[in-house]
Amino acid sequence: MPGLTIGDTIPNLEVDSTHGKIKLHDFIGDSWIIIFSHPGDFTPVCTTELGKIAAYAEEFVKRGVKLLGLSCDDVQSHNEWIKDIEAYTPGCKVKYPIIADPKTEVIKQLNMVDPDEKDSSGNLVPSRALHIVGPDKKVKLSFLYPASTGRNIDEVLRVVESLQKAAKHKVATPANWKPGEPVVISPSVSNEQAKEMFPQGYTTVDLPSKKDYLRFTNV
Ligand code: BEZ
């Protein structure tokens, strides 16, 4: 069976974390969540990533997004590691829970296993996976990075904004889009519907095909 991917409902697992036991669907509630995995505690790239995510936490809260980390060590190890994370990124507080998955059960169910890496005992290790899950408990977007490449938290925030705009209006965001820039109107919206849905107006790009599918608006 293929692993958890876009459009799937995240399994309602009960997991151990630095904030105690968490049932994933209860944790999501009516929010969006970002669940992100890390190859291991006390590793250099992960230490920078968790600190950076903590530093951006307010930006995620403002957008109704909860954060949930995961690493395959136990809670005691996570709590020790948090001291390093906070020391490395001054001013950051790791207020979000970090799942403990020492038996690598959660990473298998959430499609977060690194296919190329094993630890020194031959056990599975997580990749740098990240799922953004909507209030309907479905996966909206996933990143899958190898251990060698730390994630860009500006990009995580950017895609959250894109997903939330697309969920609210029938729009999509074009290449290299940044928050505040025009968006494109979804192809499923006719020109008649677009006039009603976007009273602020929209512009249609004149293309050689003369097809009027590339329409920009501001929402
Ligand atoms: C790191 O977080 O720095 C890391 C973890 C596993 C392999 C390589 C790098």
Image: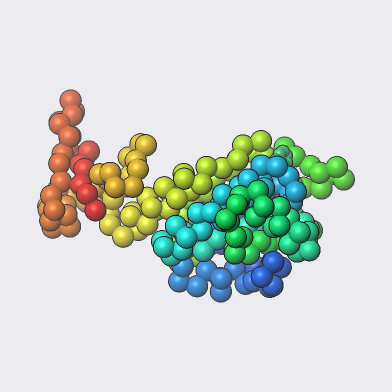
Residue 23 visible to an observer of this rendering: yes
Up-down relation of residue 26 to residue 206 (above or below): below
Residue 195 percent across, percent down from the top left = 12, 53
Task: Establish if 171 lies above or below 204.
Answer: below
Q: Is residue 27 left or right of residue 81?
A: left
Q: Which residue is at 37% across, 57% downward?
A: 164
Q: How is the image coloured?
A: rainbow
Position of residue 124 measured from the top left corner of the image (x, y, whole percent): 77, 47
Question: Residue 166 placed where, x, y %?
Answer: 33, 54
Q: Is residue 34 above or below residue 191?
A: below
- Would residue 90 appear left or right of 183 to someone viewing this image? right
Q: Nearer the viewer, residue 125 or 70?
A: 70
Q: Residue furthest top?
A: 208
Q: Quadrant of ligand 1?
A: top right
- 119 or 211: nearer the viewer: 119
**Residue at coordinates 12% horizontally, 56% vertically from top-left?**
199
Report if residue 68 is visible in the image.
Answer: no
Residue 184 spot, x, y in % from top left: 26, 44
Q: Quadrant of residue 107?
A: bottom right
Q: Count the marks: how many?
A: 0
Residue sticking out furthest to the right: 121
Image-quadrant location for residue 213: top left
> Does 164 sit left or right of 94 as displayed?
left
Q: Residue at x 70, y 42 (%)?
A: 44
Residue at 63% x, 45% y: name it. 48
Residue 203 is left or right of residue 28, and the answer is left
